[in-house]
Image (cartoon, rainbow, N blue to C red):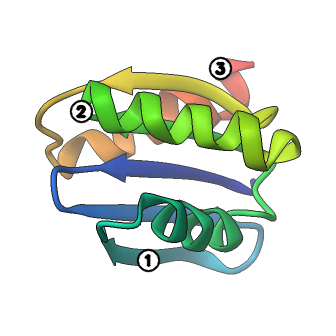
Amino acid sequence: MNACIIILKQNQIETVMWKDNQGEKRLQNSIHENLEQTFASVSRFVESAQEMIVVGESSISHDYRLWLLRNNRSLANKLIAVIQADYFAQDKLEAYKKKYFSPSSK
């Protein structure tokens, strides 16, 4: 599985990536005033993902989705879900991973 979840919070973006035979990798970015720079950094980290979901506050989730459509169409095509949530608990991570990325969810 090469998949990732991008968690967009008010002041930071947490990215969790699962790669075949490499386990889990995490990246945390502070959200800068320059969203373009922040979104570009996150997108470089997840470029190898085959599938991804975005979870977060509606305005920033929407902004990131639009940025992907304008700046990285191939990565935008890998987006399988955008989930609006003002709060994200870490215990949801495994639930989303199982729901969206497990072989039985296909």
Foreground tag (2 vs 3): 2
Q: Residues within 10 Å of mark 1 (few under 14, many from 20)?
A: some
Tag 2 residue: 57
Q: Is residue 7 above or below residue 62?
A: below
Locate residue 47: give its quadrant: bottom right
Q: Residue at x 61, y 66 (%)?
A: 40
In this rendering, position of residue 80 left or right of residue 47: left
In this rendering, position of residue 83 left or right of residue 31: right
Q: Earlier in the sequence, mark 2 or mark 3?
A: 2
Q: Secondary structure at mark 3?
A: helix
- Who is closer to the viewer here, 104 or 71? 71
Which quadrant of the figure contains the C terminus?
Answer: top right
Q: Is residue 33 above or below residue 60?
A: below
Tag 1 residue: 27
Foreground tag (3 vs 1): 1
> Residue 49, percent across and down?
75, 56
Q: Earlier in the sequence, mark 3 or mark 1?
A: 1
Q: Secondary structure at mark 2?
A: loop
Tag 3 residue: 105
Distance from Cα at disc 3 to Cα at disc 1: 26 Å
Amino acid type shown at disc 3 = Ser
Distance from Cα at disc 2 to Cα at disc 1: 18 Å
> Residue 32, percent across and down?
31, 71
